[in-house]
Image: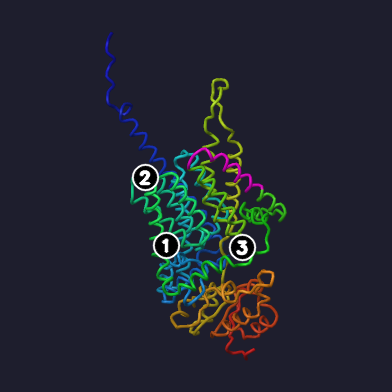
């Protein structure tokens, strides 16, 4: 018997596996970059469609967060000097942009923040691919694109809101926990914990996914791994919160925890919330009626959650993502307060469970083969749901405008040289480039005038329901007193948003107008008699 010829060492021999692995990493990097660029492009597109980064945001909250960071840049402290109803993580995140606004203009600082949040959206979409890469490159690509085009993710990442920061922290923690050999890498474990801690200091809702991830760590690895993760979380949360907590411990606890838990439930239904989570705003853009919007949104969400959770249950990571999805949706449905953009809280877990579901649905199952081919679990349902979601997101990304024009060039000269400008929204001070000047001049600046109605001016009826601002006389007097404390004032919100009706509205409209443009009026409260 002749010996078999020796196999030469060549690319087709022992070195081949390393070449394949290297190509796989290259493919993963390309997918990560492509998904990130797609997400950034869509978000920047919504900003440009809305008048550019200097335009007036469609939200109120992002102006509050930027103003809070600007206040800190001038030495004022949240909880001690002004109302802030969330942990201070968003203040730290926006502080570099507030410093930029201090040395340039407020509009430049906010514009930079809005563009940075669009990039943050790209990073979040890319992290979805990294976290779900073990389910296969195609499934991870679907998850990344799903996040890049999910409607509420597009909305909140077109301006500096809370949800994108918490999403980044959660996805970063999961990416670190999915690293190779993480059970033996202490530094990675601590870093993953630090990322979880940063999610906690953005909004108290993030306590739910953080606890679930900690439970996953406890079940999958030994106790020392859990201890390092917990210590990392405690360390990062302490670094962010302690400077403010030491200045006003009782007040911070009241605003961040008690005020949030004590907020009255808004007058919406579970069906309405489900429709918002399922992309109702996008269907409105398509011209559907409110009933159709609610029905379609509810159906998409429920089918997506159930199908993906069941399909993903076959793997350890899939079970984690399924539990996260169900828990996050439960928080959104039971929370006292809810606005449409809060649905972005669920965007990352949906994007994670979809790749796990695709992987689970496409897996081989035991049983006889049919015509020589192994049977596969049906993947049509999951594929249709993912495809429908991507279509919805594509419509959102191509039609949604993240801002609206504001006549800053015409109104900024009107307040130039005026000491202390006031407004019912921080956006008025930002667009007039008066925010930093007010802080510099030592003026009274109410960071978020409506926030006090959830704190010291919060009123409830005997049955526990919340008194609306229009019926809160103390609130209306507080707002009127603040608005007339400056040399000029501008009303940015509709009367329904402020609760300004009747006498207060008449008083404000009696103040002389110093300048008017684009539907906005700068008034002079000092030139009118007290009333």
Out of 105 and 68, give the one closest to the viewer.
68
The segment highlighted magenta reads: 299-316
Give whichever of 189, 49 is nearer the camera: 189
Crowd class of label 1 (few under 14; some 14 to 19; many from 20; radius 10 Å): many
Circle on res. 331: none
State the CA–CA distance, disc 2 to disc 1: 23 Å
Q: Secondary structure at mark 3?
A: loop
Crowd rating for badge 3 (residues with CA inside 10 Å; few <14, some 14–19, many 20+): some
- CB atoms of marks 2 and 1 within 8 Å: no
Q: Earlier in the sequence, mark 2 or mark 3?
A: 2
Q: Earlier in the sequence, mark 3 or mark 1?
A: 1
Provide residue 485's location: percent of width, then percent of height.
Answer: 55, 85
As measured in the structure, the alpha-carbon distance from the residue carrying label 2 to the one carrying label 3 is 39 Å
- Asked whether residue 312 is drawn in magenta, I would say yes
Q: Residue at x 42, y 44 (%)?
A: 30
Where is residue 434? Give x, y as percent.
49, 78
Give the labeled residue for mark 1. 237
> Where is 69 relative to 395, above or below?
below
Identify the residue position indicated by label 3 in the image. Answer: 336
Percent across and percent down for residue 351 are 52, 48
Observer-nearest of 190 and 136: 190
Q: Are marks 3 and 1 in contact (CB under 8 Å)?
A: no
């Amino acid at each position: 018997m002749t010996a078999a010829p020796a196999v030469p060492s060549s690319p087709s021999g022992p070195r081949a596996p390393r070449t394949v692995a290297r190509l796989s990493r290259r493919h993963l990097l390309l997918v990560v970059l492509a998904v990130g660029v797609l997400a950034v492009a869509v978000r920047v597109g919504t900003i440009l469609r809305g008048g550019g980064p200097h335009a007036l945001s469609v939200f109120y909250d992002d102006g509050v967060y930027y103003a809070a960071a600007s206040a800190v840049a001038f030495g004022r402290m949240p909880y001690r000097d002004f109302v802030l109803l969330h942990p201070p993580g968003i203040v730290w995140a926006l502080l570099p942009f507030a410093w930029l606004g201090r040395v340039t203009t407020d509009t430049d600082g906010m514009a930079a923040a809005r563009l940075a949040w669009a990039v943050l959206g790209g990073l979040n979409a890319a992290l979805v691919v990294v976290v779900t890469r073990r389910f296969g490159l195609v499934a991870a690509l679907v998850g990344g694109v799903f996040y890049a085009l999910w409607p509420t993710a597009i909305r909140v990442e077109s301006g500096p809101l809370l949800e994108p920061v918490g999403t980044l922290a959660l996805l970063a923690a999961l990416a670190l926990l999915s690293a190779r050999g993480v059970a033996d890498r202490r530094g990675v474990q601590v870093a993953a914990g630090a990322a979880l801690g940063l999610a906690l200091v953005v909004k108290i809702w993030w306590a739910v996914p953080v606890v679930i991830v900690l439970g996953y760590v406890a079940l999958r690895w030994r106790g020392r791994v859990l201890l390092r993760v917990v210590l990392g979380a405690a360390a990062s949360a302490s670094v962010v919160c302690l400077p403010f907590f030491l200045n006003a411990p009782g007040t911070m606890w009241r605003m961040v925890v008690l005020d949030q838990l004590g907020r009255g439930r808004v007058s919406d239904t579970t069906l309405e919330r489900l429709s918002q989570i399922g992309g109702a705003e996008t269907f409105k853009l398509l011209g559907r009626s409110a009933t159709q919007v609610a029905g379609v949104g509810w159906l998409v969400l429920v089918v997506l959650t159930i199908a993906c959770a069941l399909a993903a249950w076959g793997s350890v990571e899939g079970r984690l993502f399924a539990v996260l999805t169900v828990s996050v949706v439960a928080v959104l449905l039971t929370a006292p307060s809810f606005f449409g953009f809060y649905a972005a809280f669920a965007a990352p877990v949906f994007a994670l469970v979809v790749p796990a579901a695709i992987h689970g649905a496409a897996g081989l199952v035991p049983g006889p083969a049919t015509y020589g081919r192994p049977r596969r679990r049906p993947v049509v349902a999951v594929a249709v749901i993912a495809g429908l979601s991507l279509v919805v997101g594509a419509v959102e990304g191509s039609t949604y405008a993240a801002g609206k024009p504001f006549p800053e060039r015409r109104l900024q000269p009107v307040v130039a040289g005026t000491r202390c400008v006031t407004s019912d929204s921080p956006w008025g001070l930002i667009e007039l480039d008066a925010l930093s000047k007010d802080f510099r001049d030592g003026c009274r600046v109410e960071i978020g005038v409506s926030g006090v109605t959830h704190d010291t001016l919060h009123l409830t009826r005997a049955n526990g329901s919340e008194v609306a601002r229009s019926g809160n006389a103390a609130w209306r007097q507080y707002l009127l007193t603040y608005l007339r404390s400056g040399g000029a004032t501008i009303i940015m919100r509709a009367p329904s948003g402020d609760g300004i009706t009747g006498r207060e509205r008449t008083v404000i409209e009696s103040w002389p107008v110093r300048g008017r443009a684009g539907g906005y009026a700068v008034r002079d409260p000092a030139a009118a008699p007290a009333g």
